[in-house]
Structure formats: structure tokens, C-alpha cells
Image: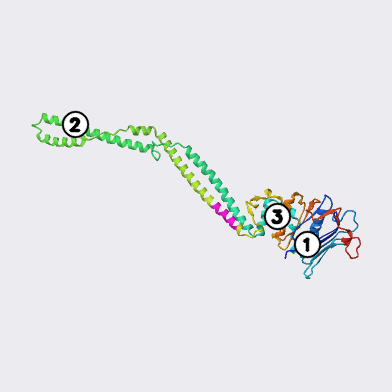
Amino acid sequence: MSMKINQLEIENVKRIKAVKIEPAVNGLTIIGGNNNQGKTSVLDSIAWALGGDRYRPSEAAREGSVIPPRLHIVMNNGLVVERKGKNSDLKVTDPEGRKSGQQLLNEFVEQLAIDLPRFMGSGSREKADILLQIIGVGSRLAELERKEREAYNERLAIGRIADQKTKFAKEQPYYTDVPKVPVSASELIKQQQEILARNGENERLRENQHRLEQEYQNINDQIKELLRRQAETEEKLRVARLSAADLKDESTKELEENIKNIEEINRKVRGNLDKEKAEEDALEYQRQYSALTVDIETMRQAKMDLLEAADLPLPGLSVEDGELIYNGHKWDNMSGSDQLKVATAIVRKLNPDCGFVLLDKLEQMDISTLNEFGAWLEEEELQAIATRVSTGGECSIIIEDGYIAGQELSAIKETKNWKAGDF
């Protein structure tokens, strides 16, 4: 059973003179009134009574009072919490006879429930961290977010490089009239020398033909004397003619031109190779970018699965990029009612045994929003004691000059013998 406040009595605390309140079990109990009448003093008194000396106001005693502060709170399980006397000593009476004192109160009193402004005023990431820790996924989600952030940054860098490589490749000229690899000057010279050698051999064969022609002519002149030699020479001539008949000199003009333009050719070849390499690099970085995109999407889905499986305190509540999200809105875009709803739900989740929360300055809410928030509290069986600068009908009680308006002093004294400083 969640602990709630059944009854509270306050005397001589800050601006309060004497107040007795029985809050609604569930929903909103609004303490209204004008400024400086003692509304916030009620909340400060509850926080001090239940939260301990860390919440004791710096000037706890009401100004002008010779009677020390007195606090008396009865919880819904019969537990009685009192602070009274010169030193405002704490006394906790447990109907079940369990351990008493502040240690017992700490078991069910959630610090943020009596100090909700501390949660409301914390940063977005701090709020998200509190939620993630209480649902038990903080460390796992942090690891996923770290990996996602690293992959995102790597993908961003890879994408920039891929864009640069693609742009660089597009800007490079490409020459279609050059070979695939750089031309070697020594190779071209070697080819030229081989052609010259073959041409030299052709020239030798032509000279041989000419010599044999001359010899043949001489043999004809001396045919009678050189008949035998004529026959041999005719055979040689026949062979020589066959060897020289289809000979054709090769031109070295193209090689000479290539040698002359080798630097320009190689410049174009290197340009083509650079363009092809840039295109390959761009494709590789685009592949890496796509792979990292898949990794990021996988991590994001893992985060969503982790949060969907978690026991969140409120439907529609989640964490994205380290910030609280409720119904698609970040904290600074939530309505005042939604902010209070989220804060209250998280505080309740921190300590399910604490069934109440203290809220200050609800005048920021219009009546419709106030009713909506109150209805949600009732549905969740939560008790909220709040203050509001107002004397309207939405207020459960009105504080005037340290008293509840309309509450007769005799009603506070009740039927028991009463003296100053006692209820």
C-alpha cells in the first residue's frame, strides 16, 4: 500500500499560525490564497516533518511567536509523525511497533516527492537519466547511444570524404586517345632501334641483290667462260629475288612522335588513372557509408526495443537522444500539466511506497488543465497537495494570515483542553 497523508496539523511554522488539513486521498488538494498568507509554508512544513532536518526552513519559527513550531502528521496506515518542542524533536509512532525515527520515514518518503521543484528544474538529460536508472536500462541504453554516436560521427566523416572523392573524380579530365598505362621512353627507343635494325637488314639485302645483278651481268658477258658460275649465280639470284620481293620498310614516324610527346601522353595516362582511382575511392566510401547507416538503424531499433520492453511509469513516455519525450514532445514543449504528470509519474516510480507529492505554484495552470491533471492523479490513485495563488472555487482550502479561512479556532481546539501552542 502506498503511503499517503490522512491528516496534518501545523502551528507556528514560517507564516502559519494554526492550520489543520485533511487532504483528499486521491487527486488534488489545492491550498489557495493570496501572496504571503502561508500557502508555501504548508508544503515546507510537510517536507520538514517527513524529509528530515535537511528540509528545515532556515527561519522555521513564525516571526513574533514565542511558541516553538509544532507539526503533527497522520499517515493512512496510522503512522504518526510529530515535531515539537524547543528543538523540534522528531517523534514517529508506528502502530505496528516497527523501528521508528527518520530511518522509518526514509523507507517510504521519496525525496523528490517533497522537493519536486528540484526535479522540475533539473536539466533534460538529468531527468532522462533518472527515468532510465529507475527502469533499469540506463547503462544498456547509454552503451547503445555511445555506439550509435560513434557510428554516426564515423558515417558523417565517411560521407564527407565520399562526397569529396566523387566531386574530385568528376572534375578530372579523361583522355580516350592514350594507353591505359604510362608510356616508357626507353621502350619506345628500343622499338625504334629494332625497326632501324630491320630496315638495315633490308638495305643489306637490297645491296646484295644489286651486287648479284652486277655479277650476273658480268657472267652474261663472260657466259662462255663462266657457264658454271652463271648457273650458280642464277640460283642465288632467284633466291635473293624471292627474299627481297615482299620486303617493306616500317615507318618510325609514330614512334618518333610518341617519343617527342611522351610527357604529354603520360600526363594524360596519369590523369586517367587518378580519375579511376578517385571513382573507386568514392564507391568504397559510399559502401562504408551505407554499411554504417545500417548499423545506426540497427542500434536505434535496439534502443526502441529496449525502451518498449521496459516498465515505463507512463504510457507515451520515452527517451530519445538522451532527453525525455512524452507523446512526441520534449520537456520544454510539454504543457504545464504534462510536465507535472511526467514528473509525478517518475517520482512515484522512484519509490512506489510513496503515494503523495507536494506541488507549489499551480497558478500557472488554467482551470481546464488543473482539472485534467487532477483527474489523472485520481486515476493513478496518487495524492497531491499543491498551492495556488487564488481564492477561487478550485481551491480545497484558503489560507488567510496563517489560518484556514472559515475555520473556527474552536474547531482547531476541538473538544480537548487546549492551551496556546497545542491543537
Q: Position of residue 252 (x, y in %)?
A: 32, 33
Q: Residues within 10 Å of mark 3 (few under 14, many from 20)?
A: some
The image quadrant where one finds the N terminus is bottom right
Q: How far across and how far down the image is residue 366, in percent?
A: 74, 49
Magenta stretch, overall SS: helix
Q: Alpha carbon of mark 3 to alpha carbon of mark 1: how far?
A: 20 Å
Q: Nearer the viewer, residue 58 or 383?
A: 383
Residue at 58% x, 57% y is 305
What segment is highlighted magenta in the picture? 295-306
- Given the image, on which type of amino acid does mark 2 rest? Arg
Residue shown at 14%/35% (left/top)?
234
Residue at mark 1: 5
Q: Residue at x 57, y 55 (%)?
A: 301
Q: Where, by quadrant of the figure, is residue 53 drawn?
A: bottom right
| Three-letter code, disc 1 | Ile
Residue type at numbered disc 3: Lys
Q: Residues within 10 Å of mark 2 (few under 14, many from 20)?
A: few
Q: Are marks 3 and 2 in contact (CB under 8 Å)?
A: no
Q: In the shown orientation, is residue 119 left or right of residue 268?
A: right
Q: Which residue lies most toward the left here?
A: 224
Residue at numbered disc 2: 211
Q: Earlier in the sequence, mark 3 or mark 2?
A: 2
Q: Which residue is mark 3?
A: 341
* Of 303 and 170, the residue lying toward us: 303
